[in-house]
Image (cartoon, rainbow, N blue to C red):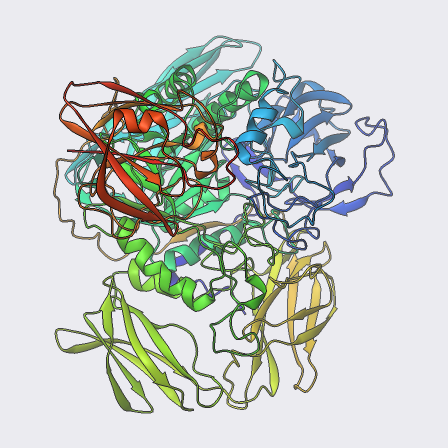
Amino acid sequence: MRLPLGAILLFIVTAFAHAAGRETINFNPDWRFLKADPAGASSEKFDDSAWTLVSAPHTYNDTDTFDNWSLPGHRGEQQQWSGRTWYRKTFDAPVAWRGKKVFVEFEAVRQVAEVYLNGKLLGTAKGGFTPFGFDLTPHLKIGERNVLAVMADNRFQKDPLDPALAPQAATNEKTHPNLAQLSKALMEQIPATLAELSADQIPWNNPHWHPAHGGIYRNVRLIVTDPLHVTLPLYSFLQTEGPYVYATEVSEKSATVGLDIPVRNERDTVAKFEVQVEAFDQDGKSSFAVRIGSQEIAATATKRFTPRIVIPTPRLWEPAYPHLYRVVITLKSDGKPVDTTEIPLGIRAIQWTVENGLFLNGAHLKLRGWGQKSTNEWPGLGAALPDWLQYYTMNLMREAGGNFVRWGHVPGGPAQIAAGDRLGIIALQPGGDGEHDTKGGAWQLRVENFRDVLIYYRNHPSIFIWEGGNQKVSREHAAELRALMDKYDPHGGRAYAHRRADAITAEFMDVGIGTEGGREIALLPVVEGEYNREESPRRVWDNFSPPNFGYPEAKGQTYQLTSEQFAVNQVSHYVKKLGAENHTGGANWIFSDSTSGGRVAVEVARTSGEVDAVRLPKEAYFVTQAMFRDDPQVHLIGHWTYPANTRKTIYVAANTERVELFLNGKSLGLGQQSDKYLFTFADISSEPGELTAVGSRDGKVIATSTKRTAGPAVALRITPIIDQNGFVADGSDVALFDVEAIDAQGERVPTFQQRVDFNLTGPAIWRGGYNSGKLDSINHRHLDLEAGLNRVAIRATRQAGAITLAARAEGLKPASVKVSSTKFTGALPAVPSVNLPKAAPVRAVATVITNAPKKSGALMLGKFIKTLNYTAPNASIVHVEIGARDGKNAYVNTDSPFTNLPSVLHDGDWVQADNRDALYSAVDFMEIAVSGGSTVYIAHDNRLPRPAWLTKQFTATTTTLAVLGQSFTVFKRTIATNGESLTLGANTENTNLTEGAMYLVFVNR
C-alpha cells in the first residue's frame, strides 16, 4: 500500500547527489548511541561497540512522550528524560577525498550539541532547531577510519511545582508561578555570554513551547567538494552565506532575477575559473542561462558575483500554482566542473496593505491555515520523523484548503519549508523565541539563530514573513533583528513581524501578528498568528454517543468541549475573527495535538489540533475543509450510529448556499444558516439508515455528505500507509497502520472503544500509538481504538525483509497485513514535487504588483491610543487592541468574549489587560496617551469599591458591560488636548479583597 497523497506528489530520489564535482552523502545511518555521559566519549579510541546502533533522524524521547498528563497552566509535558547523551559514527575517508573539502551539515540537534572529529572539538551548537555545519577537512584522516562524535544535551527548563499538589493541579499564583513570573526569574539567571549559557537556560527550551525531545532528530549529510567552491549557507562555525537568488520588478510579462554567488578559493594558489548559471522550470526546460567567464581569485579569498537577468513571461509562484525553478550554479576550472550547487527560485510579488491585507502577484489572497510546532511530535516517534512524514502533515493541511503555516515559535525545518515550497503553503518563519525578551548569552543566541535562519532559508519562496519574536522586545533588540533581515534578505520581498507588539517594536515591523482576531498596531497590516485555541480530543463525539456520552472526565477543566462542539465552534471563530473579505487571514492554533502548552488535565496532549497526534482527522478538520476550500464542500458533522430514541441537533458545515437534510430518502428540510458556513437542523430523531446532507447553489446540487448507521463490530481491518519510495531499511524510516473496527458491511463502527492487541514479526521496531485520555499508553503492544479507529507506527531496522502486523480484539475477527522493507541504497531523503495545473490561474489583479515597502518611524498603537505604559506583573503580554466588538476577548490571558457590547464602545480601542493583575496595587498602574477629541471609558467591576483616582477623573454613566458573567459600570472622560496623558491607578485600594475582575479601558470618538 502506498502513501495516499494522491497525484499531487512526485518523489524524486537519487542514490546520492554527485553533480560536477560536489557530492552530497546521506550520513543518517549507523550511529552508535548511549543515553549516558561516559568520560572520554569524544575520543576516537573510545570503545562504543556495546552502544545501541541507531540512524538519524533519532531521538531518545520517542517513547516517553504523550504518556503523562498535559499539565494545565500551559506547562506542557515535563516528565521526560533529560541529560547529556552521545552519538558516535565511524566512517572511512577514501583516498578520492584527498585535496577535497569535506563538510558535515546537521539540520538540527536538540538542544545543545558538542561535535568532535577524531577527538577534536569542532564547536558547540545551542539553537536546537537551526541547521549548522563544520569543516571536517583540517582533522580528517584520508585513507583511514575517522570518528565523528556528538554530545546531545536536552536538559530543559521545568516550572517549579508544589510537591504537595497533584501535578495536574490548576496553575495559580499561590501554588505555581505564572509564565510572566517564571520568565522574570529566568532572566535573573541568564549568564552574560553565550559560552556560559546552559541548555536549561535557553528561553525556547521549555515544554511551554516544545516537547524536550533530545537527539540528532533531523538529517545529517556530508558535502564533499573542491577547495574552489560556492560557499554553504551555514554561517555559525563556517562564517559562510551561500548563494542568494531573488526576483524583483515582477509582473506577468517579465521579472528580473538577481543572484549573489559567493565563491571561495581554499586552494594553495590563485584559481582561474568561470561561473555558469542555468535555471530550469518545473518541466525541466531551460528558462535562462548566464556565463561569467575568465575569473581569478586569490588563495583563501572569497569573491561575489551578482548577475541580474530579465526573463519574459515568468511562471509565478502562488499557493494555487506553486511553480519552482531550479537554479543550478556551476564553477568550471580548466574547462571542467569543480563544484555545482542548486537552489530553488519562486518568482512572486508580495504586497501588504492595512486596509485589505495581502496581495500576491497583484491579486488579493486570503491566508487560511494553522500554527504548528516544528517538532511536529508524534506518539512513539517523538520529533524524529523521516521527511515523508513531514510532508504528510503538510499535505493534510493542503487537502483541508490550507495555504499558510505559522511555525511556532522556532523555525520550521528544511523538510517542512521545502514541502511548503512545493505544496503552496506560505510560511511565517521565526528565528527562535519563547514568549519574552531576554538578555546576555540568551539574547546573543537569539540573534545568532535569527541570522542563521535568514541565511539558510532565504531562497525558499514559501516564506513570506520573518518573525522576530512571539512577543515585543526592546527598541534596541528590535532594531538589531531588523538590521539582520535588511542585511541578509534585502530583496526577498518578505516582511518583518512580532506578535503582541507595541509602538516601539512596530517602528521596525512591516506587519503585525495578531492574536484571537486582534490587531495591536492600527497602522500596520495584520496577519493572524493564533486564533481558536480551544481544546477537545478526537475520541469524544458528542453528548449522545456511547461509550462516553459527552466528556464527563473534563468537568471543571478549562475546556470541556466535545468533538462536535469543537467542530461547530470552528465556524464562528473563523468568521467572526478572520472572516471579513478584506482580512488577511492567518493561523488557527494548532494543527496537530501537541504535548506542549495544554490546559486540560485529563489529556496527554494539548488537544487544540484539527487532527490528533497521529494525524487522524477530527470533525473540525472537515469543517475547515468546508470553509477553506474553493471547490464545493459539504460535511455532516458527527456520525449516525446512535442509541434508539436519540433526539439531537444535527450540524452541517458547507460552502454552498443551501443545505437540505435527508433521512432514508425523506427530506427533513433546510438547515438554518449561520456564520455563512454552518447549517443547523434542530431536534432530529435518530433512525437507522442513511443521513445525507445535500448542498446546492443556484438551485443545483453541487455537493453531498452521507453518514450511515453501523452495525455491531465483527472484525478488525488494517490499512498500511507507506512512503511512495517504499519502506526503506535505513534504520529510521516509518510505516503507519490504521486499525479499524468494522461491521458486517465493512463500515467503521464509530462508537467502538475497546482494547486491541498487536503482534509484529520481521525486521522492524514496534513504536505503536497512543490513547489521548490515558496515562502510559505509549509503546505497548496494545491500544484502545478511539471512535472505532487508531493508528500505530513501526520503525525500520537496517535489515530488509518481510514484516507482518497482526491485530486482535475480543469478540472480533482478527486482521493482519504484510509489508516489506527494501534495502537502503544510500539515497538522500526524498524531495516532493507537485503536479501543477495545466495552466496558471487567472488572477483578478487588483493592485500594482510590487514588493512590500519597509516601514519606519513611530506608529500609533490604536486608532485613538498613542502610547501605553502598563506596570503590573503581567505587563509583557498586555497591549492595545482595535475594533472592539462582540466576540473579541476582554482580557489577554483568558477567553473572555464581549457580549452585547454597548454602542459607545463598539469599534473603539481597548487595553487588553491581564485579569490576573486585578488585585495588584500600584499608584501608576497604567499610563495612557490618546488623540484629542477622544473619550476614555473605564469599565469597573461592580463587586469592587471604586478607587479614588476613578471617581476623581471620570464620571459614572448608566451604561453597563458584562464580562465573565460579572457586571461592570462604565465611567467616561472626554479628552480635548491631542496627546493628553492619563495616569490610572490600581483596580482596588482594598488589599484585603480576594476576588474581582480587572478594569477595562476603552477609547473611542
Q: In which image quadrant can residue 875 be found?
A: top left
Count of labels in the image: 0
Residue 416 vs residue 185: left or right? left
Residue 833, image x, y percentages: 40, 51
Viewed as shown, does residue 574 lie left or right of 448? left
Residue ID at (44%, 58%): 610
Say whether residue 282 is visible: no
Give x and y (percent) for residue 964.
39, 50
The residue located at (16%, 78%) in the rendering is 700
The x, y position of residue 748, in whole percent, is 51, 80
Q: Image quadrant of residue 149?
A: top right
Is residue 717 something that shows in the picture?
yes
Q: Quadrant of the C terminus?
A: top left
**Residue in view at x 77 percent, y 46 percent:** 53
Displayed quadrant of residue 943: top left
Q: In which quadrant of the rendered image does the N terminus lie?
A: bottom right
Left or right placement of residue 288 versus residue 90 in this view: left
Residue 576 locus on image (x, y percent): 27, 53
**Left or right position of 443 against 159:** left
Q: Nearer the viewer, residue 686 or 197?
A: 686
